[in-house]
Amino acid sequence: MPKAVRIEAAEYVPPCKLKLRFNDGRESLVNFAAFLGQSRHPSVLAYHDRKRFRKFTLEDGFLHWNDFDLVFPWRICIKGLFPNNLMTLATTTICLNDKTQN
């Protein structure tokens, strides 16, 4: 059975990048600038603050912020970029979550 890919280490790289190391030996530099810059959702806009962006957590191979306020699939992180449709998907997911809580 293939070994599950997980993020082993994450290091902040100014202004809004993370250098990630995976358990299969791969490394990736992920630039979150486009995602953060395009979003208009308040939960994402909060991470324009570099101090807040730097407060990510690596837990059990998952990279997240503020107890899963923001979280990204490792497949996106391993490529080091965000495909064009991720912004739409992420915004739709956040908006749907907001609507279900009202």
Image: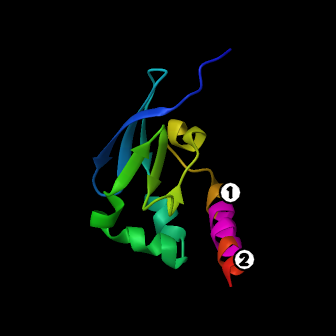
SS for tag 1? helix
Q: Amino acid at mark 1?
A: Asn
Magenta residues, dominant SS class: helix
SS for tag 2? helix
- Residue 15 in the image, given as x and y percentages of width and height: 30, 57
Q: Residue at x 35, y 61 (%)?
A: 53
- Up the image or down, 14 lies above or below 40; here it is above
Based on the picture, tell me whether residue 72 belongs to the magenta stretch: no
Highlighted magenta segment, given as a residue range = 88-96
- Up the image or down, 67 lies above or below 4; here it is below
Along the line of sight, the residue nearer the viewer: 63 or 59: 59
- Residue 80 in the image, given as x and y percentages of width and height: 49, 41
Q: Which mark is residue 85?
A: 1
- Residue wearing tag 2: 100
- Tell me the quadrant of the picture where the C terminus can be found: bottom right
Q: Amino acid at mark 2?
A: Thr
Around disc 1, counting alpha carbons within 10 Å, would you say few (fewer than 14), some (14 to 19), or many (20 or more)? few
Along the line of sight, the residue nearer the viewer: 20 or 80: 20
Q: Quadrant of residue 16?
A: bottom left
